Amino acid sequence: MATGDALARPFTYDAHSHEVAVQATIDGIARTFLIDTGVDPSAVDLAVARDHSLKQVGGHGEVEGVGKSTATAYPSIIPEISIGGERYGPLDVLVIDMSKLSAGYGAPLGGILGYSLFKDHAILIDYPTGQMTIFNGSAAREPSHCAKSYRFPLRFLSDDDHLITVPGLKIGGTEIPAFIDTGSSNGLRIAIDAPATADIRAALPEGRESTSVGARGTAAQRLAKLSTPVQLGPFTLDDADVAIVHGGSMPIGIGNRFFEALGATLLVDIPAEKVGLFEGCR
């Protein structure tokens, strides 16, 4: 467990990747780890697991996620991982070949930090400043004196699926179920064939064909900008970037480009069971 009250760390976030990443150290070797609130438990690359002789503690299973190929993983434990000199662990992980994800990211990835870390530590991702704060336990202090704020209780999709749901997201006045996906480089990832998106399909532009890269390889998507506003509490975003896809666990995934466009700070506090979006704080 971390020993300090909070640890502020700059995260990597650029126009190419639109991914949140930090440098984390295992056995003194620094590697790049993505931050993904939608990954359960966490993940480590197969080659990295072999380099550090991480032991297999269970059988292989198929991985869910973006992509059409079959991908398998096995459970393991990282005894200790260090972020900015602060030590965390032991950390449950799934060991998976992340070479395709690394190629899509443009640099070697050591793994993905997800639920097995954040279940015990609140995080604050400040998109305007490029700073991430990891708290020892629940966040001691939320952003205050903000021009805009939207707080809601933390709810998971189910007891077994730790996707964090977001109430109140509206497209053109129609409320649609959504979840937070800090592992996504998209703005809003819209599952066009989900029943809950039926009322907005006519408002979705055709977009241009593209591909996304996930744990299971590549998948087709269409990229576009919405001509209708997106509302989330007091926040309103015009011309939101969207990726239109087929399939998915939830109708809409809210990715990094959306939070970046809002100029918002995102609080995910699983220990205290609360989530918040803040803008213009002092």
Image: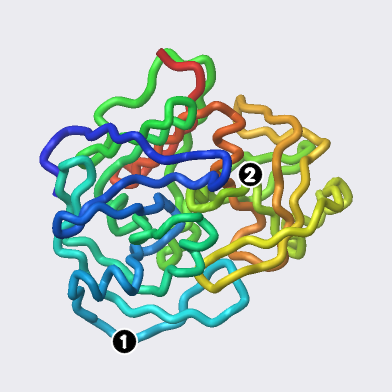
Most distant residue in the left direction:
3
255 vs 278, left or right, is right
- Amino acid at the residue labelled 2: Gly
The residue drawn where x is 42% and y is 31% is 130
- Spatial CA distance of label 1 from label 2 is 35 Å
Count residues near mark 2 (Cα–Cα under 10 Å), then give few for <14, some for 14-19, many for 20+.
many
In front here: 243 or 102?
Answer: 102
The residue drawn where x is 46% and y is 30% is 265
* Position of 233 relative to 120 (above/below): above
Q: Secondary structure at mark 1?
A: loop
Q: Which mark is residue 187?
A: 2
Q: Which mark is residue 59?
A: 1
Q: Report if the CB atoms under discs 1 and 2 are less than 8 Å apart.
A: no
259 vs 84, left or right, is right
Count residues near mark 1 (Cα–Cα under 10 Å), then give few for <14, some for 14-19, many for 20+.
few
Position in image of residue 118 (x %, y %): 31, 50
- Amino acid at the residue labelled 1: Gly
* Position of 238 relative to 90 (above/below): above
In front here: 54 or 248?
Answer: 54
Position in image of residue 213 (x %, y %): 58, 63
